[in-house]
Amino acid sequence: MGEKAKNQNNQNSKIDFKEQKQDSIEQKGDVLLLNKINNSKEVLANNNIENKLNAINKGGKDTNYYDHSEKIDFKDYLARNVDDQEFEDIMLEDKRTFKEFFLEALNDKQLFVKTFNVVDPFCPSSLKLIIFILNLILYMVINGLFYGEDEISKIYHIEGDDPFFGFVTRSITRYIYSAVVGVIINIIIDLFFVQEKKMKGIFNREKKNIVNLKVQITKLSKEIVIRYIAFIIFVLVLFLLLMFYLLCFNYVYPHTQGDWVKSSIFLIIIMQILSLLIALLQTGLRFAGFRFRSEKLFKLSKLLD
């Protein structure tokens, strides 16, 4: 009996030793993962994402996202976009007024408003200012790029004083080309930035698994930093090319400088007015679709989004 008890105790001790060893391995794995997550806190803080993690743990309130004095319901923030639903459901659930929707559309489309009035946690003020300056330079470069030989010849052979707005009739074709090219370039610029809906998707998928959520957000933070660096390199190279072109253009065609400067400023003003009109048209079509229960008008407004 003593030998049997002794053998049984030895087996139990072996089993306990194996269980302790297994627990130790799992604990080490957890420690490594938590250390990795803790090391990423600085990155998360720089992108205003850690605030959202705290919001989940505290029950759904984010008190430091857009404004320190404003409390945001986290559930509302993660709710599905109302425009992702069927047309009839959108009419019932979208409670925004004409003014509210117009201001949202204007914030999204108007360059000056988007730069100086909209707070974007995924695009710091410094980057927004770089994009703003880049847009202004691009308008001027594209405007100069489409000067034709006939137009340059007309400017050179103008007799007497050219009316202050005499450049307008000569610039209509250039303005159309500039608007098209400007839209394409802005689409390319947007490729460097992570959309906020990507972060919302991560929160919605992983909100029940806090550890996995932190890991996914850390990966997103690294992706944001990499894209920012790539964008800065892209802008530096592009700035050098654009400035070189502008110097060459003004050196080769000195007589077009006055016309080019005036038409470029006028182009910038036109583009800002055009963005305002597009926002107004989009809002009008949307609410006309609601008023007349026309899904076609609503879809037409979505094309301007």
Image (cartoon, helix red, strand yellow):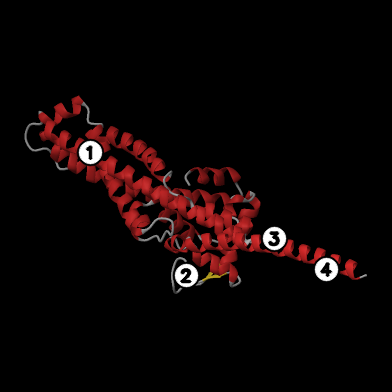
Q: Earlier in the sequence, mark 4 or mark 1?
A: 4
Q: CA distance from mark 2 to mark 3?
A: 41 Å
Residue annotated with mark 3: 22
Q: CA distance from mark 3 to mark 1?
A: 79 Å
Residue annotated with mark 4: 9
Tell me the kind of residue under disc 4: Asn
Q: Residue furthest right?
A: 1
Q: Are marks 4 and 3 in contact (CB under 8 Å)?
A: no
Would you place residue 55 above or below residue 138 in this image?
A: below
Would you place residue 186 above or below residue 210 in this image?
A: above
Tell me the kind of residue under disc 2: Asn
Q: Are marks 2 and 4 in contact (CB under 8 Å)?
A: no
Q: Which residue does the image show at 41% across and 52% down from the upper left?
A: 225
Nearer mark to the viewer, of 3 and 1: 3
Question: Crowdedness of circle 1 by 10 Å Cα count: few (<14), some, many (20+)?
Answer: some
Tell me the kind of residue under disc 3: Gln
Nearer mark to the viewer, of 4 and 1: 4
Q: Horizontally, is 75 left or right of 232 in the view? A: right
Residue annotated with mark 1: 168
Q: Are marks 2 and 3 in contact (CB under 8 Å)?
A: no
The answer to which image quadrant residue 150 occupies is top left
Circle 2 sits in a helix, a strand or a loop, which is it? Answer: loop
Of 30 and 59, nearer the camera is: 30
Q: CA distance from mark 1 to mark 2?
A: 48 Å
Q: Earlier in the sequence, mark 2 or mark 4?
A: 4
Q: Is residue 173 visible?
A: yes
Residue annotated with mark 2: 64
Q: Position of residue 87 (x, y in %)?
A: 63, 49
Q: CA distance from mark 4 to mark 1?
A: 99 Å
Q: CA distance from mark 2 to mark 4?
A: 58 Å
Nearer mark to the viewer, of 1 and 2: 2
